[in-house]
Image (spheres, coloured by chain):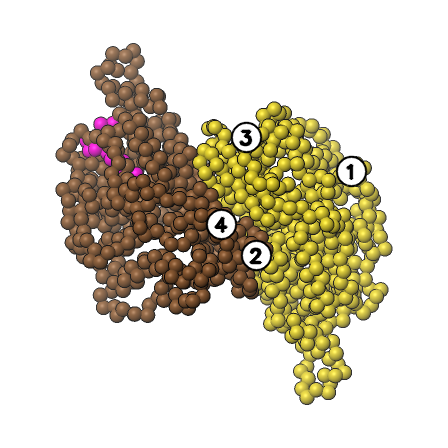
Chain colours: A brown, B yellow
Amino acid sequence: MRLIHLLATAALVATPIAAGAQTTPPPAPEFARVVDEGTNRSQVMVLAQHMTDVIGPRLTNSPQMRTAEAWALAKFRDFGLSNVRKEGFDFGRGWSINASSVRMVTPRPIQLTAIPIAWTPPTNGTLSAPIIVAPMSKSRHFAAWRGKLAGKIVLVTAPGKVEDATEPGFKRLTGEDIAKLDSYREPSYDPAAQARRNAAATFEEELDAFLKAEGAVGFATMSYRDNKLLHGEGYMHKAGASPSLPGVQIAAEDYRRLARLATMGPAPTLEIMSDVAYDDSDTQAYNILADLPGTDPRAGYVMAGAHYDSWVAGDGATDNAAGSAMIMEAARILKAMGVRPKRTIRFALWNGEEQALYGSINYIERYLARRPAPATPENSTQNYYNQTTRYPVTPLPGYRDLAAYFNIDNGSGKLRGIHAENNAAAVPILREWLSPFAPMGSGSVVFGRTAGTDHQFMAAIGLPAFQFIQDPLDYSSITHHSGADTFDHLKAADMRQGAMVLAWMLLQAANADTPLPRNPIPNQPVVTDPFATPDPNAE
Amino acid sequence: MRLIHLLATAALVATPIAAGAQTTPPPAPEFARVVDEGTNRSQVMVLAQHMTDVIGPRLTNSPQMRTAEAWALAKFRDFGLSNVRKEGFDFGRGWSINASSVRMVTPRPIQLTAIPIAWTPPTNGTLSAPIIVAPMSKSRHFAAWRGKLAGKIVLVTAPGKVEDATEPGFKRLTGEDIAKLDSYREPSYDPAAQARRNAAATFEEELDAFLKAEGAVGFATMSYRDNKLLHGEGYMHKAGASPSLPGVQIAAEDYRRLARLATMGPAPTLEIMSDVAYDDSDTQAYNILADLPGTDPRAGYVMAGAHYDSWVAGDGATDNAAGSAMIMEAARILKAMGVRPKRTIRFALWNGEEQALYGSINYIERYLARRPAPATPENSTQNYYNQTTRYPVTPLPGYRDLAAYFNIDNGSGKLRGIHAENNAAAVPILREWLSPFAPMGSGSVVFGRTAGTDHQFMAAIGLPAFQFIQDPLDYSSITHHSGADTFDHLKAADMRQGAMVLAWMLLQAANADTPLPRNPIPNQPVVTDPFATPDPNAE
């Protein structure tokens, strides 16, 4: 750390004092200094290792996330950033796993591979009960199982089949892959499909209520990846609305075996020990923000963000300690370089992304724009689905200040370029800014838009908010949300490149003569097929 | 079962009685009858499911294997085979897992993914101790750790890195892949390399003795596959020579995290609970044999075999319930068809294959040929390594009786052809026999030889013993010895095809006018490089 401060100081005060030094090297161009700082004094893997190995999984509002919040604030201050702060918003309970065990005890003993589902209650000792396989994925499936679940551990997933891994699990993008991303994707809105999604979004709560009413004693889902990987996502994180029953996700191989044995009969008996704990000490979740102040207070600011929270099966390394560490490292690089950008550069670590982009939505509502409140109460998943169906969008005074937003949330893979998110006018500018990184594999600006992470609802209101293109590596095949999302799956060289690209792009956006062009603020959803006749029986 | 018996009866007595029936369909050719029986009345998946889901892993001499032995004997008798028997040989102890748990308790609690190593002792409750990372893979590595291991759980594997899965995990062979197998592989013997392998083969015992002498309280290895897969192989199965210390194999991601945290310090503390049990009720292991008698007692016999034993992380589905079920199904098909082959057809389920081809070596020594006893005592791994270095080979009277041997041990993939195992004269004959299966994907006879399974030491003494070529599917990438080796990874259509090919090839070999050609019995090992100067410092 000491080295970094010395460098930062030297750079900041270079003109008056260094003039008196014996030897003053000629100033290197900014690009070369980004690469020097980001390569030769890189901290990105040290930061990522602390987030993952030392702190561990960072479920929103968990004790581990509280540690992570405090650590990130301290680290940003230690780097010398300004206005380092956390901004709270309502979220719900914390939850963490201390220990767990799931065993089949009859017809033969097997230690199963399983994980408690997030926010399910503890078993308070060992729960022992026979299973019943009762696949339910919609509330209309409940009727078939009424009266059959009392005293049972209910296996609610249809077992399905092993998915053959006919594609490589680890992949880097070819030029052809990237070219395919360079196409316009029209926003779409199908009111009937939207209604179905909203209905499906309450299934977890409905299932819990049904299982409780039927006297089931626990439930299990099947992992959606094969080969013994586990994930354990759950969404009932609101205070006063926790699941009634202990629940575990069981590895696909173990789950399917249980299902086959249950089909043959007699039903296997499971023992579940789920030593998990809620933490209600603070129901607010917090975004972490830090600034590198600009020299022109009227020029607005540029921002980069990554979600800091994770699921708990692994350590949230590729999702998204990787992006969080790149954000922090970009801040460190720029501060160490002593840059004095025209616009303020803001660094954001979002929280609650995994439960429905809580953090970035909160930032939008606080600073950028408001949409009408929902007509009927929504859970967080519905709030996510319905963002782009609520109009009008009313910009707040801060709307004009945000000159660019860059998001990172696709693992540790090299940044190969950037999605212009349907912002045609921004394409040539982004391309020019990115061009020095072409020899490091990152020269591509593609037109297409992306979704599912924190830039999404900024881009949706016309802001110049972009997601990077990343080499997928084993993100979608293996690590995303899984128990294998650990530090050893991060690629150090890729992470260093990512932090440098990010630092550089922020600097270009912060110093640009004119801010990036924006798209218009939409005033209604695009109805994909205005003459469609809704099918009430659609799946 | 009833249906099968009726059909078998009808076929056996077709001529005198069926003549009086109202309608006698013209006899179908044998090939069509194999396909009819093996497709329309297939039992192969039912057999495999019983071996895996119901019986479970079949570690040699474990209680599960005892159940499996009794079940296979009953099943062969139920099919109507003759001379159904088990043949015992010295093996050692049984061992099985009842429950297990491995947790990191400091610096933060994590339920780790881990499995007890085969034949390690139980912890008798929970063992709690700090770890030390002390990579040791050769006895010369011990010196560096002397005096440092007392009271510790010793992590003995070097952590290494994640291996990027740049190839598909699931694969079927292309014609090009198969063509590559069609090449001669010279037997090879490098005395210096052989000496090193023999020395390495005692490492497990030496490590155990060292850890015990140093006062270590337990040990852990790292899984050799990434992505949380586990295996848990261990080889100290001899009575009176069990490991001294409890040992677990830890998933690579979890192990590497422990190693990184230990490097940072303070060393993490683990809690290991290994509820495993030995079974010394019978130290003999058993091959299962069953005959379909030939009509010409002087014509000898043909045989097919698969090893029945497995490791315990999964249920031993692809390794090798798949092959075992194909063997049993081929027996059922041929018996149901009522064939009366010239030569006896023998079906073998080998035991102790995973610990060094115990079962098939025992069969060879009992019936086929003897080699000199080793000059110095050998453990089972050394016995495996040294088979083809001990000369002369002395044929037993049964040597001439074995007219063909077919082995299956590469998962549930479709049989794509057969390895002629360097038996050039057999190639055209095998090709002719196999030709009707070309439209089912199994037309290829390749020259190359294979090793590592039960035909190996029969082929090595000149016998016409062959291993099939199989589509690899996810065998080498995922299921081989792993916790994902479960019934759901078996491909039903492939398994049916395999049993039919096997039944057909046995029938051709049993009825051939002349037995298959043999290679000469070798009288010394091929020394690969007679003028090599051994490098005493070689790895």
Mark 2 burial class by Cα count in 10 Å: few <14, some 14-19, many 20+: some
Q: Is residue B126 above or below residue A168?
A: above
Q: Nearer the viewer, residue B362 or A89?
A: A89
Relative horizontal placement of residue B124, taking residue B75 as reference (left or right): left
Q: Position of residue A440 (x, y in %)?
A: 37, 36
Q: Which residue is located at x 65 percent, y 54 percent?
A: B64
- The answer to whether the residue labelled 4 contacts the one labelled 1, judged by CB atoms less than 8 Å apart, is no
* Residue under disc 4 on the same chain as residue under disc 1: no
Relative horizontal placement of residue A99, taking residue B190 as reference (left or right): left
Residue under label 4, please give it. A126
Separation of marks 2 and 1 at Cα, in angstroms: 43 Å
Mark 3 burial class by Cα count in 10 Å: few <14, some 14-19, many 20+: many
Amino acid at the residue labelled 4: Thr
Q: Nearer the viewer, residue B446 or A98?
A: A98
Residue under label 1, please give it. B377
Q: Which residue is located at x 22 percent, y 45 percent?
A: A364
Amino acid at the residue labelled 3: Ile
